[in-house]
Amino acid sequence: MIVGHRLMAAGEYELALKAYYRAAAEQGLTTDVLSAIGSANLRLGRLGQAETQLRKVIENDDSFVPAWNNLGVVLMERGQPGEARRVFRTAYALDSGQSDEIRENLRLAIAKTENPAYGYTNKNKFELVRRGSGRYLLLSTP
């Protein structure tokens, strides 16, 4: 997992995904491993796979904040701001409002649902979060 996290931080998402698959073979599909695989697929633009994996994480552990947040990012990228807003709200509540990144994601999703013409600019970005140290940014484009 550590190797995968380092590869993600370095922008080597395909290699990170392979490292996460190795971790899955060694540890099984734990919540952390499946969430990491989903996040890597998200960064690779494999939104359907990422959504499926992140939903499985939530089914197994509905209090896993990074999976809720990252699912919200997937939904925004797939053009589903209404559901993304609900998902970000859940992540924010579970996190007790501690994460600035999740609060900003929720704010952007609310803005998008209240004003469908609200477009993304280079200043609007959704934060991809994971458990542990380090942060990954997922930039949204129009």
Image (cartoon, rainbow, N blue to C red):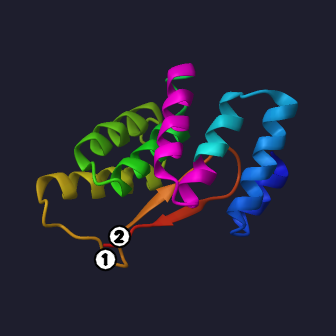
Q: Residue furthest right?
A: 26
Query: Predominant secondary structure in magenta?
Result: helix
- Amino acid type, mark 1: Thr
Q: How many marks?
A: 2
User: Dot 1 lies on which element?
Assistant: loop
Residues at marks 1 and 2 touching, judged by CB atoms closer than 8 Å: yes
For mark 2, what is the residue?
124
In the drawing, what numbered circle is on residue 6? none
Q: Tell me which residue sits at (47%, 41%) in the image.
A: 51
* Crowd tier of the residue under label 1, counting other residues whose Cα lies within 10 Å: few below 14, some 14–19, many 20 or above: few
Residue 45: horizontal and vertical position, in percent? 51, 60
For mark 1, what is the residue?
121
Residue 81: horizontal and vertical position, in percent? 26, 50
- Amino acid type, mark 2: Asn
**Quadrant position of residue 9:** bottom right
Task: Give the magenta range.
Answer: 39-60
Horizontal side, residue 27 vs residue 73: left or right: right
Q: Residue furthest bottom?
A: 122
One can see residue 98 in this view: no
Q: Tell me which residue sits at (50%, 22%) in the image.
A: 59
Residue 5: horizontal and vertical position, in percent? 75, 54
Residue 91: horizontal and vertical position, in percent? 42, 37
